[in-house]
Image (spheres, helix red, strand yellow):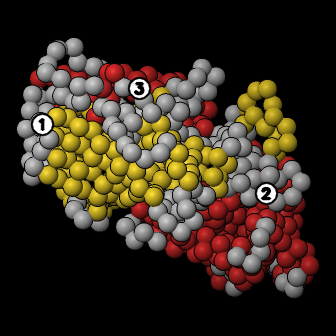
Amino acid sequence: MNFDKKTLFAFILIGFVLLLINTPIYKRVFFPELYKAQQQRKIQQMAEAVEQKRDSLISNKEQASGVLPVDLLPPKTDKREQIGPAETENLSEKLYEVDSDFYKAVLSSKGANLVGWSLKNYKGPDDNAVQMLPENASSTLSISFISTQGDTINTSEWSFTTYSPSSIRLPANNSSTIEFVCDLGDERRLIKKFTFFPGLYHIEMEVSLVKMGDLIAEKVYFLNAEDGLASTEKRLNDDMYYAKAAIAAGGEVNKKFKTNGQLYKETGDIDWVAARTKYFVLAIVPQGKKGLSGQIVGEEIQINETTKTKWKRYAISITMPFLNSDFVKDNYLVYLGPLDQDIIKSYKIGIEDIMDFGFVVIQPFSQAILWSLKKMHGFIPNYGIVLILFSIIIKIIVYPLTRKSNESMKKMQALQPKLSEIKEKYGKDPQRLNKETMKLYKSEGVNPAGGCLPMLLQMPLLWGLFIVFRSTIELRGQGFIWWIKDLSMPDAVVTLPFSIPMYGDSVCILPLFMGATMLIQQKMTVTDPKQKMMVYFMPLFLTLLFNQFPSGLNLYYALFNLLSIIQQKGLPGAKKQSTVETAGKGKRIK
C-alpha cells in the first residue's frame, strides 16, 4: 500500500474510533471487565454520596443550605414542629389540566407542582404525544427552603387551593393563568401563579412568599425540578447518550456534570439551569434578577432487568435570594419543549448553548448544514428528497477536491513500479531510499500528500454532517419512502432475537446499500493487489458500524458514494488514468 492510501485510511479510522471510543457500547464490547468494574464503582460512589449528604444535612445546617431539597435523601426520623398547612393530611390531591394546540400541562394541588407535560406535535414510542416528565413526577417546579430549625422543607406535600376550573382549554389568541395559594396561618402564604400561552412552549411562573421570614433561614429559597426528564425515544441508549444538564452563569455554560449521584454546584450570577435528553429540554430562567447558585445531581437508574442501559435522571435546582422577610416576588420563564434551534434561540437567553454542534472548528459547518437543510425543507416537504438534493449539492461543492485527490492517488499508483525498484535497490540505506524517493516524486510532479490533503479538508464537513444527522430534531419522525418511516432512526426491517456486538439487534437495508456502494468505489480506486484486504475491510467495518445509525445518515452516505462512482466512471478526468499509468512506465532506475 502506498503512503498516500495508508494515510487516507488511517485518518478515516481515527475519525470513527474517536466517535466510538467514549461510548458505553465501545467499553462494553471491547473492555467488558473494565466496564463492569466502572459500573460497580459508580454504584458504590452513588451510595456513599447519598449517605454523606444525609449526614451533612443532619449535622451541619450551613452545608445543608447548599444542597438540593430533601426528597433526594432518606427521610429524617426526628420529630420537630410541623411547618406547613395544618390541613395537608386531610385534603386529597386534585389535578388541573391546561390544554393547548402545542401541549397539555397537568398541575397538582400538592405542592402546586407540574406533574405532566405532553407535546402534541411530537410522537413518543407508543405513537402518542411525547411525555416529557416521568410517569411518577411530583416535584417539578417545587419550592424548598432551609427552616429556622435547620430542616430542609420541601413544599411538594403542602396542599394548595385555587379557584380555577380543573380543565382549561387555552383560547387561540389569549393566555390563561392559574393561581395556587397555600395558607400557612398568621398571614403567611406561599403563592404560585402559572401563565400559559397558545403556540408557545414556555410557562411564565410567579412565586410570592408572604410574611415567611420567620420560617426561612439562610435568606435563600430553592426552585427545583427534581423529577428529571423521561426518555422519549424507542432506543433508550441513544436517547441517554445525549442526556445532560447545564448551568449558565455570567454568560458561561457548564455542561460537564457526571451521573454519579454527587452534588455539583455553580455559584455566581445564574442565568438559567437546564436538563435535556436527545431532542427535548427543560430550562428554568429567572426573570428580573439572577440566581445565587445552580445545583445539579445526576444519577443513573435501572429501569428494568431486560434493559442494560440506565435512565439518566438530572435533578436541577436554582437558589434565589430571600432578602425581604415580609414579601418576596420572583418571576421565571420555564421552557419545556423541543431542542429546535430556531425556537430556543428566539428567546435570546442562550438556552441553545446546551445543544452540541461539535468542536469549535466543526460548529460553523454543523450549523451551516442544519440551516441549509431547514431552508430546503421550506419548499420541499419530504426530508428524504431534501437529503438526496443535499448530497448532490455537497458532491458538486467538493468535486474539485475529490477529483484532485483521485488524480493524485492514480499518479501514486502509476509510480508504484518505480517506487518498488527504488525500495529494492536502496532498501538497506534509509537515507538514500528517502532521497531517491523524493527525487522521483519531484521529477514526476507528484505530491505524496496530494491525495490525502483534499480529503482532510473535507473532514470538518463530514463530521458536521454526522453531528446534524445524529442529534438534531429536524429529522425526528420524518419518513421517506416504503420502509423508511423515521429518518432519525435506523431503517430496521428485521429485528433479531439477539444482539451482535457493534452491529446491534436489527437488520437494516440502507447500511447494506451504503457498504455495497463503498465496496464498488474501493474496487474502482484501489488497483494494487497488496491493498485487497483494505478494499473489503472498510466497507464491512462501516456497514457494521452504521447499522445502528439514523437512516438519514446512511441515505446521505450511500448517495454520496453512488455519486462518487458516477464521477469516477463517467466524468472527465476519470479517463485520464490510462495516460497517467503509461507515464509511470518509464525507464528503469539505474
Residue 126 location (% of width, % of height): 70, 39
Please, what is the three-letter code of the amino acid marked with disc 1?
A: Asp
* Residue drawn at 49 percent across, 30 percent down: 136
Question: Depth check: 359 or 67 in front?
Answer: 67
* Residue drawn at 21 percent across, 42 percent down: 189
Structural crowding at the residue carrying mark 2, measured as other residues with C-alpha within 10 Å and reported as few (<14), some (14–19) or many (≥20): some
* Residue drawn at 43 percent across, 47 percent down: 164
399 vs 215: above or below: below
Question: Depth check: 489 or 559 in front?
Answer: 489
Residue 272 location (% of width, % of height): 32, 57
> Label 3 belongs to which residue?
92
> Label 1 belongs to which residue?
186
Please, what is the three-letter code of the amino acid marked with disc 2?
A: Gly
Q: Earlier in the sequence, mark 1 or mark 3?
A: 3
183 vs 578: above or below: above
Q: Are marks 1 and 3 in contact (CB under 8 Å)?
A: no
User: Any mark on residue 479, and which?
Assistant: 2
Please, what is the three-letter code of the amino acid marked with disc 3?
A: Ser
- Say which element carries label 2: loop
* Residue drawn at 24 percent across, 65 percent down: 288
Q: Quadrant of the C terminus?
A: bottom right
Q: Which of the two discs, 2 and 1, sits closer to the camera? A: 1
Q: Earlier in the sequence, mark 2 or mark 1?
A: 1
Marks 2/3: CA distance? 45 Å
Marks 1/3: CA distance? 24 Å
> Hey, which quadrant is residue 520 in on the image?
bottom right
Residue 106 location (% of width, % of height): 49, 42
Question: Depth check: 485 or 45 in front?
Answer: 485
- Say which element carries label 3: loop
Residue 315 location (% of width, % of height): 37, 39
Structural crowding at the residue carrying mark 1, measured as other residues with C-alpha within 10 Å and reported as few (<14), some (14–19) or many (≥20): few
Q: Earlier in the sequence, mark 2 or mark 3?
A: 3
